[in-house]
Image (cartoon, helix red, strand yellow):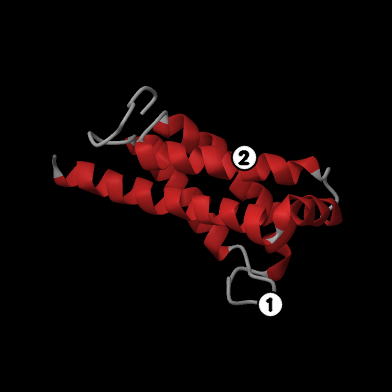
């Protein structure tokens, strides 16, 4: 494996792991009911919360294992853009602002774009669309 392959692996593992952590939080801490209620409070249908849990889980696993890596990254971008539009955008740029600004979700989007551009590298379980 080359340095490029190690870099792609590190990026996939870290971003995928963060998506799994957020899915875990929504499912086990906030619960699906709490998540759907929160999404409704944002003015969107509550089932979007369940879609977010499923997308974070499937996308996170796809990134970690290198399964359809580029597709997974591309499909997660609108999810993160939605967090900027619906939640964090009104709080300013800095994520340390009250309620969290859009700095951190924007960084996630940049990481996802990079993953979509470079693909999974050689350390992928199933590199189709990788």
Establish if 36 lies above or below 121.
below
x, y percent for residue 121: 26, 36
Residue 26 is left or right of residue 67, and the answer is: right
| Disc 1 element | loop
x, y percent for residue 124: 29, 33
Q: Which mark is residue 7?
A: none
Establish if 35 lies above or below 68.
below
Residue closer to the observer: 123 or 44: 123
Residue closer to the observer: 88 or 129: 129
Residue 95 is left or right of residue 17, and the answer is: right
Residue closer to the observer: 17 or 86: 17
Count of labels in the image = 2
Residue shown at 53% from the left, 37% from the top: 58
- Which residue is farthest left? 1
> Few, some or many C-alpha atoms within 10 Å of disc 1 (few <14, some 14-19, many ≥20)?
few
Residue shown at 60% from the left, 68% from the top: 93
> Few, some or many C-alpha atoms within 10 Å of disc 2 (few <14, some 14-19, many ≥20)?
some
Residue 50 is left or right of residue 57, and the answer is: right
Q: Which mark is residue 54?
A: 2
Residue shown at 63% from the left, 68% from the top: 101
Residue shown at 69% from the left, 72% from the top: 99
Establish if 130 lies above or below 58.
above
The residue to which callout 1 is attached is 98
């Amino acid at each position: 494996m080359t340095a490029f392959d190690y870099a792609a692996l590190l990026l996939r593992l870290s971003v995928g792991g963060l998506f799994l952590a957020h899915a875990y939080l929504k499912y086990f801490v906030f619960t699906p009911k709490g998540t759907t209620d929160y999404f409704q409070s944002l003015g969107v249908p509550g089932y979007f919360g369940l879609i977010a849990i499923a997308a974070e889980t499937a996308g996170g696993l796809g990134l970690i294992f290198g399964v359809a890596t580029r597709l997974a990254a591309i499909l997660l971008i609108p999810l993160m853009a939605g967090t900027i539009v619906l939640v964090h955008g009104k709080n300013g740029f800095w994520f340390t602002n009250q309620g969290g600004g859009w700095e951190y979700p924007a960084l996630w989007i940049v990481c996802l774009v990079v993953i979509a551009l470079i693909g999974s590298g050689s350390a992928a379980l199933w590199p189709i669309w990788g």
